[in-house]
């Protein structure tokens, strides 16, 4: 069957000239798959297979464009060239032909190649037919066993592409699930992160747990705790309908350098044991960052407060202080755990109002002001006084710096 070549595969879209590639050369993997599916990316991720001189070619292109060069695997001859808007990997062909190389890959839809010189799609494993059926089909059980991360990657790719996993492939994954324990924890974490960060990944995160791929990492998770994942998505949807800004924040990464969204944090809290020390150990095992671990532990700690019938202003102040930027994840988790949207509305309203002094206190004096004016040394007392001043400001007891200092002096004299 002749497969028409998508225009997006054209070398015109590449960050380097086709003339710098030797003949033959083949574009393979996700870029070809996504082009056939009409999936576009702002940041290009290209993978080339060359019969020879893969690293030499990569060095030449990197040097010509003054781009970044990374030798990924000297033995297997794999190198990467990093452009501002693209990453391009060059790998030496495995085996004596392109077909042999493609037969060593994970799934048929990722084993389609494109020859830019002949404008030909090469599909020896019928990956195109599986693309049409939106199916992930393994090439062989041995290929999955050779790199057990592929077991988890099946669920992540099914989530990202909106595919289903072919039944025999899923049965094989279940039978090989124990091999996931041989994979570096951070690689598992990255795949899981894709599934937790969006609602379309939830069914596949649940399937990965049911099929034995996550039980080794989250030993205390249960069917009940896993069943809360779709409840988190439902809560996030309810929140976004009423408070658009909060919905936007849920979809944002918790930090620019951390690829977990606040929605992902809420779901991660469902997977770990609610007891903080155990939860922290589980998250550290999967090499989560301190920021991610702190966000999950803060959520687990503060959830019970949302069940309190009526929080005082003082209690609300301390809740916001402790929650910080994790508030969207915490309120979503609270609703997923049974707190009504109506009960959380007053807190959400405060959080979304930048002028609300309970959620976003603005200091009218500094710790330095207090130490100089009241002649007291740096100590925990200064922090306590600043907290009391903030609460007095909320309650309307003070509104100027002078009143704040006088208020602090009164507190000291009472002690």
Image (cartoon, rainbow, N blue to C red):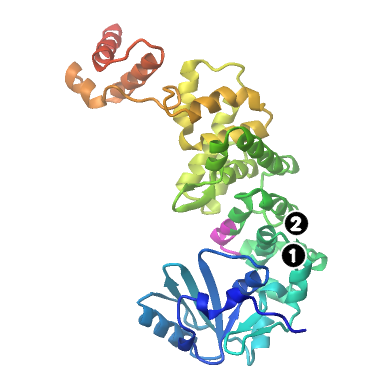
Residue that label 1 marks: 173
Residue 105 x, y percent position in the rendering: 66, 77
Q: Residue at x 65, y 59 (%)?
A: 160
Label 1 environment density (alpha carbons within 10 Å; few <14, some 14–19, many ≥20)? many
Q: Is residue 103 above or below residue 399?
A: below
Res 270 label: none
Q: Residue at x 59, y 76 (%)?
A: 9
Q: Secondary structure at mark 2?
A: loop
Q: Is residue 52 above or below residue 42?
A: below
Q: Is residue 279 left or right of residue 401?
A: right
Q: Is residue 345 left or right of residue 376?
A: right
Ranked by sequence position, the earlier of labels 2 and 1 is 1
> Start and end of the magenta stretch?
183-190
Label 2 environment density (alpha carbons within 10 Å; few <14, some 14–19, many ≥20)? some
**Residue 388 belongs to the span the image colors magenta:** no
Residue 206 versus residue 46: which sits nearer the camera? Answer: 46
Query: Is disc 2 in contact with disc 1, using a CB cutoff of under 8 Å?
Result: yes
Residue 380 versus residue 55: which sits nearer the camera? Answer: 55
Residue 406 versus residue 84: which sits nearer the camera? Answer: 84
Residue 384 x, y percent position in the rendering: 34, 21
Q: Is residue 212 left or right of residue 88?
A: right
Q: Secondary structure at mark 1?
A: helix
Q: Is residue 129 above or below residue 204?
A: below
Q: Residue at x 58, y 86 (%)?
A: 93
Res 211 label: 2
Give the dominant element type of the magenta stretch: helix, strand or loop: helix
Residue 215 seen from this side:
no
């Amino acid at each position: 069957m002749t497969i028409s070549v998508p225009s997006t595969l054209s070398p015109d879209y590449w960050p380097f000239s086709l003339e710098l590639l030797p003949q033959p050369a083949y574009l393979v993997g996700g870029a070809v798959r996504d082009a056939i599916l009409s999936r576009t990316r702002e940041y290009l991720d290209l993978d080339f297979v060359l019969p020879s001189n893969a690293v030499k070619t990569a060095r030449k292109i990197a040097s010509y464009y003054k781009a970044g060069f990374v030798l990924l695997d000297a033995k297997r001859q794999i190198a990467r060239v990093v452009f501002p808007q693209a990453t391009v990997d060059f790998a030496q062909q495995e085996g004596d032909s392109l077909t042999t190389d493609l037969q060593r890959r994970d799934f048929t839809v990722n084993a389609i190649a494109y020859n830019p010189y002949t404008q030909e799609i090469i599909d020896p494993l019928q990956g195109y037919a599986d693309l049409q059926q939106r199916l992930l089909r393994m090439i062989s059980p041995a290929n999955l066993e050779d790199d057990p991360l592929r077991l988890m990657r099946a669920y992540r790719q099914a989530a990202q592409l909106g595919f289903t996993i072919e039944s025999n492939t899923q049965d094989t994954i279940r039978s090989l699930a124990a091999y996931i324990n041989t994979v570096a924890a951070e690689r598992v974490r990255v795949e899981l992160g894709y599934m937790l960060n969006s609602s379309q990944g939830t069914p596949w995160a649940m399937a990965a747990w049911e099929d034995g791929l996550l039980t080794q990492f989250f030993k205390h998770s249960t069917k009940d705790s896993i069943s809360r994942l779709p409840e988190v998505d439902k809560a996030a949807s309810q929140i976004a309908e009423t408070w658009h800004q909060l919905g936007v924040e849920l979809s944002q990464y918790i930090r620019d350098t951390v690829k977990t969204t606040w929605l992902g944090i809420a779901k991660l809290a469902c997977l770990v044991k609610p007891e903080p020390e155990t939860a922290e150990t589980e998250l550290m095992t999967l090499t989560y960052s301190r920021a991610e671990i702190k966000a999950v532990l803060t959520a687990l700690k503060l959830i019970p407060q949302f069940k309190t019938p009526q929080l005082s202003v003082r209690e609300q102040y301390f809740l916001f202080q402790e929650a910080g930027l994790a508030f969207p994840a915490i309120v979503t988790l609270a609703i997923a755990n049974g707190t009504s949207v109506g009960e959380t509305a007053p807190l959400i309203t405060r959080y979304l109002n930048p002028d609300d002094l309970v959620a976003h206190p603005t200091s009218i004096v500094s710790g330095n002001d207090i130490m100089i004016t009241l002649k007291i040394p740096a100590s925990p007392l200064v922090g306590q006084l600043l907290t009391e001043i903030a609460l007095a400001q909320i309650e309307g007891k003070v509104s100027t710096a002078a009143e704040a200092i006088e208020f602090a002096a009164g507190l000291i004299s009472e002690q």
